Image (cartoon, helix red, strand yellow):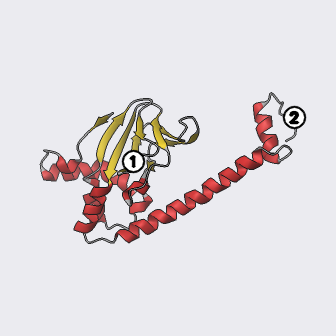
Amino acid sequence: TVSGKPLAESSLPHTLRARVCLAIRLPVLKRCPIFEPCPQVLKKAIALYLTPEIYSAGDLVVEYGDRGEAMYFLVRGTVQVVAENGLTIYATLKAGSFFGEGASFSNVRRMASIKCTGFSESLRLARIDVQNQLRAFCSDEQLLIKKFNSITARNQERNAAIQNNLQIARIPGSRLYRIVQYIHTDNTVGDTI
């Protein structure tokens, strides 16, 4: 794991720092729906605190059970969302994804580990930096929390539907069970599902 400095702490002249930030890091932040309610000036200020981190295959970006202090924006590579047992893979995230967003608003424990499948680059955003910028710009954290809760609710609905389908796929005779069996056997195209 290699960590860089946030642009806010860089020795570059302030105007050059701001230009680099706007060109490279602001678009990453703007793609995250949590920050949609923020005014542009606040997004720019927060983007200054995105810290680059580089990981190799097998590295853990976050570990199950740890206290979350930051969220991450995946810039390059892929990572897996891994269960506590280290074996079950919940999802594979690609560049453009973000994770650990719950840590932006509370000191929660991580619900999964994030493991790199190969070379990966992410931008880390510490909760304290988000809070400091919200205070500096007199912005209401509740707007971001409301957006976060909305995204969380959608994710929970999707996860519940996936869990339901997984349970149905285990019931012999169900359509999903037959599809899974078809995929895992050497059936011909003419076989019915």
Provide residue 123's location: percent of width, then percent of height.
34, 45
Provide residue 108's location: percent of width, then percent of height.
42, 55
What residue sits right under mark 2 in the picture? 190
What residue sits right under mark 1 in the picture? 73
Q: How crowded is mark 1: few (under 14 residues within 10 Å), some or many (20 or more)?
A: many
Between circles 1 and 2, the one closer to the viewer is 1
Q: Examine the image and state in which quarter residue 140 appears.
A: bottom left
Question: First in sequence: mark 1 or mark 2?
Answer: 1
Provide residue 159's location: percent of width, then percent of height.
61, 53
- Amino acid of disc 1: Phe
Provide residue 24's location: percent of width, then percent of height.
30, 47
Residue 69 lies, with reference to residue 84, above or below; the image says below
Between residue 129 and residue 35, name the one nearer to us: 129
The residue lying at 26 percent from left, 62 percent from top is: 133
- Amino acid of disc 2: Gly
For numbered disc 1, what is the local secondary structure?
strand
